[in-house]
Amino acid sequence: MGKDLDSEKRLKFVYYCSGHGYGHATRVSAVACHLLSLSPQPIVHIVSSAPQHVFSDSIALGALYRRADIDPVIVQPVAYRVDRRKSVEVLRAFLKEKDRKIEEEKAWLQSIGADCVLSDAAFLGCAAANAAGIPSVLITNFTFDSVYSYLSTPSVNQNELTQQAVELLQAVFAQDGQAEEDNPIPEKELTPLVKEIIDGYRCADLLLRLPGAIPIPSFSIYPALPSPQWVHTRSKTFQIDVSSHLLEPTSTYQCHPPIPFPSNSRVKPKNIPRTVLSAPLIVRTPNPEVYTPEGRAKLLDSLGVPSHLHDSGRTKVLLVSFGGQIFHKPHSRTHSRNPSNAANSPKSAGSVISNGHAYWHPQSDSPKGLGFTIEQPTGTIEQDPTSHAEALSSALQEISINTPPRTHVPLHSPPLKKPAPAPTRNEVPQPRQLSKRAQSQLVVAGAPPAAIPTSPTQTLFSAGLQSSFSATSFTAVTIPPTPEAHRTAWFGGEVSVPLRTASTITMSEEIEVVEDEDEEEDLPQLFPDESWLAIVCGVSKEWGKEDGEELPENFFVAPKDVYMPDLTAVADVLLGKLGYGTVSECVDACTPFVFVPRPLFIEEFGLRLLLNQEGVGVELSRSSYESGEWAAAIEEAWQKGKERKARKREEGETGKRKTEGREMAKGIVDWVEKWYKAV
């Protein structure tokens, strides 16, 4: 016996939202707002472990919120790294309760008369919908089966650091009982756990794949798990065939068949094939007035920025945001010398630095979004003559009940060019003691860690370690971001570490403080020049008064309740970590993004592709971030994106994203109605 929909009935949606990070919550709230803008207005329940206030926009329009622990979370001691073992323990504990939770959610869905489940990206919601005999739609750019599978990827430490380097750093941390290992989880241990996750996602009937996506193996047969196989280990990019898959039209994907309703269900069998459709960019949009001189001045004035710095023609704004993490004040000079020439960096010349080797990485002849040359068969790249939203709405309405999924045709491409030989180092840098001011750091709890108070490459080379070690590799080592009082002798801005071999370092030895005011020209540089100011997000009101010191010159604090899309629109460059919410807002506002990479976050690869396609992204190594050498990356990002940013400011807020989102919401409603007619 099937469930019929009355033409006059208000559809009732239940939206399951992962509690892992606020990015899921902000886009769930945005989609819910689009649904609630329709007429007749559907009923929308939001179920999540994320706090209620994050969904305030949609709740104000009538969404109903229910708190529930509906997904496990990845354990992150700080925002830039993952505790693999604890994450697996949390997953294992959640899966023990999975069947009970599914039954609870099934009973609740039936009790409220839910018509459809939406999920971003909690697999439990899809499984509960299937148990209740109702359809489910997955709306996301990644799924957690891939994330947990990626915990088996080789450790950055094991892969890229010499054993002597690892032992040296572990010895430093062990002094304070802070030693942590980053060992990969064996694939055979992860496989049965990940299978339970993917089985939940397999219950979903439709995938609306957001921009910045990675492969979704619960829908598309190819590429399959384990996810470490998707990544090129040296260049830290997706394999060519994986990137090509992501750029293919979703209509070419061969999907797994649907998971049938339980045998004891009175609901008719599913007759609609599982489908993947490209969704538009779901993003919170800025207030239109922020693009006017008056709106910009009003926002900057609310942050305490003096009026003489409001003019966008004279002042450039750096927005620093690491997802609400806590900052300590920077002490490095903001613009004491000319920035290092970005044009001379290997990156800007089109190369990738990995393990001390340089690989040519041509850009000009590449397909959009790829950093290498591949031969594309005619017609394989999806052409979109209309907007994403219009195409999505049309596709949703035109899904044929009896049309089987098309066969996936993989693209073929030549291999990457042969790597250039590794550079040789004939000389080991001589030890140099740094002044107190040169050793000062910007410390961000949850962002990349505070650096050891000397150049990482110089310190470890001078310690007799292998010359293949790179500064970029070093930064993946966990270094506690906020030193405690008893650790000041090692990590504060008052000491320097003698450069000796690991075998001769004695932890209890007294460290000499070196004063040298003549080395100012070697100080790190935050800003390219005097025209820049920084707005820091996610800090306390007392941030500017820590240690009795005033804020650094041209640094301002944004209140925690500031509307981030407005700040992103005002900013000339954003510095932070890659996440869908931040990336989507940068793409929408045409704001160049300087990002600090994070290991073990496989969804980051898809977001990099999105920035290559529709925005500007410049990577800042963690060693450069830690030492306060931001200027070159900021200048590079601004130069690459300034013309697009100028056009956006002239254009202003067009309402395009809201129109696309509303069209997607209409398409979801149409799909649900067709689904019930089919069964």
Image (spheres, helix red, strand yellow):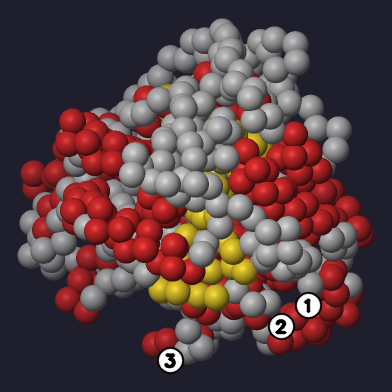
Viewer-nearest residue: 647 or 147 = 147
Amino acid, disc 2: Val
Q: Residue at x 57, y 16 (%)?
A: 408
Q: Residue at x 54, y 69 (%)?
A: 45
Q: At numbered mark 1, what does the secondary structure look like: helix, strand or loop?
A: helix
Judging by the rendered image, the residue that carries numbered circle 3 is 548
Place of residue 280 in the rendered image (x, y in percent of width and height, measured from the top left) = 71, 46
Q: Is residue 515 left or right of residue 665?
A: left
Q: Residue at x 41, y 35 (%)?
A: 259
- Label 1 vs label 2: CA separation? 7 Å
Q: Is residue 185 left or right of residue 335?
A: left
Q: At numbered mark 2, what does the secondary structure look like: helix, strand or loop?
A: loop
Mark 2 or mark 3, which is nearer the start of the sequence? 2
Amino acid, disc 3: Gly
Place of residue 677 in the rendered image (x, y in percent of width and height, measured from the top left) = 65, 43
Viewer-nearest residue: 530 or 433 = 530
Residue that lies at the very extreme toward the front in this rendered image: 1
- Are the residues at dot 3 and dot 2 in contact (C-beta closer than 8 Å)? no
Q: Residues within 10 Å of mark 3 (few under 14, many from 20)?
A: few
- Are the residues at dot 1 and dot 2 in contact (C-beta closer than 8 Å)? yes
Judging by the rendered image, the residue that carries numbered circle 1 is 309
Place of residue 483 in the rendered image (x, y in percent of width and height, measured from the top left) = 27, 71
Judging by the rendered image, the residue that carries numbered circle 2 is 305
